[in-house]
Amino acid sequence: MQPEPHVVGPEESQASDDVLRVEHVAKHFGPVTALRDINLHLRKGEVLGLLGDNGAGKSTLIKIISGFQKPDEGRLLIKGDEVELSSVDHARSLGIDCVYQDLALVNELSVFQNMFLKREPLYKPLPFVNKRAMKRETRRALDEIGVNIPRIDVPAARLSGGQRQAIAVARTVNSDADIILLDEPLAAMGAKEGAMILDLVARLRSEGRVSIIMIAHNYVHVLQSCDRVNLIQGGHITFDKPTAETSVEELNEIVVEEYRRARMAAATDGAGASGNGAR
């Protein structure tokens, strides 16, 4: 017998340490419904793994939380206060930042220049960039969260994928963000580079400095790196459990059951279409 998914309601886990709550959020793109009554919460210092098939609604949800898109229904609460995010900059001003798959690093710029992209310190009152301060703060920020980059004056193009991702995460942490959204941080990485990012997430998790939502496909990575896991299916969050209380096998069974239902529905639709054509 297949286990019943644990459906999350907005009344659950009304913890006082929630830094983010998503309540009854829906998003439509014309006739397509991307999200249906999404309810999600993130605690202070927690790492939440967000799983789901392609097209399940993960990226749309992240874009809403990061201020890139507005929900059609529902509301967001940041540290207990309801907010209507007007832009990505507005979300950042409230301590929410996103590290996307493309990392948003400029290949031609050095490590320290990328760390301070669009927020370079100046020699006041003169409008000259203070490169000495940028280098000093970059080294401090990287060392503080355990990112090993031997040279910070080399172009980002010369770094490995894992190093580039680590710099993007470090930049976000150094910008005083306290809610970080990681959109597939291990995409297209080898085992060694992926381990570097997982170690960085583990370090941030142990320090409790920031709260993280990490989109991932690999169940093992999520169970190793996260405190709790949510599963999105068809625009709903259908599963919410601490990682210590679930397993790869349980998650696989739920997803396999979803595929079985989808195949049965497709077969039924196909049979109906054939029958109508026979008439």
Image (spheres, rainbow, N blue to C red):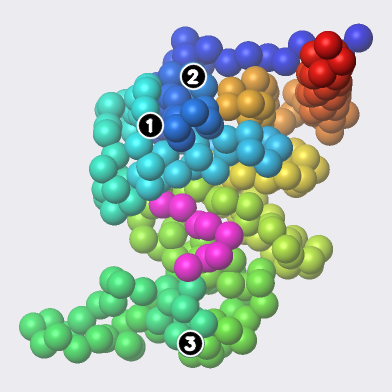
- Which range of residues does the magenta coloring cover? 97-104
Q: Marks 1 and 3, Cα distance to the nearest angstrom?
A: 36 Å
Q: From the image, tell me which residue sits under label 1.
A: 71
Q: Quadrant of the C terminus?
A: top right
Q: Marks 2 and 3, Cα distance to the nearest angstrom?
A: 43 Å
Q: Nearer the viewer, residue 195 or 204?
A: 195
The image shows residue 87, relative to residue 45, as above or below, that is below
Q: Can residue 199 be seen here?
A: no
Name which residue type carries label 1. Answer: Pro
The image shows residue 233, relative to residue 170, as above or below, that is above
Q: From the image, tell me which residue sits under label 3.
A: 108
Q: Nearer the viewer, residue 16 or 274?
A: 274
Q: Nearer the viewer, residue 74 or 214?
A: 74
Q: Can residue 118 be seen here?
A: yes
Horizontal side of 123 relative to 163 (left or right) equals left
The image shows residue 227, relative to residue 179, as above or below, that is above
The image shows residue 93, relative to residue 237, as above or below, that is below
Q: Quadrant of the N terminus?
A: top right
Q: Residue at x 82, y 18 (%)?
A: 277
Image spot of residue 87 (x, y percent): 29, 48
Horizontal side of 236 relative to 174 (left or right) equals right
Q: Secondary structure at mark 3?
A: loop
Mark 2 residue crowding within 10 angstroms, few (<14) / some (14–19) / many (20+):
some
Name which residue type carries label 2. Answer: Asp
Q: From the image, tell me which residue sits under label 2.
A: 37
Dominant SS type (magenta): loop
Which of the 4 image quadrants contains residue 74? top left
Q: Is residue 18 magenta?
A: no
Q: Residue at x 52, y 61 (%)?
A: 169
Looking at marks 2 and 1 on the same chain, the residue that comes earlier in the sequence is marked by: 2
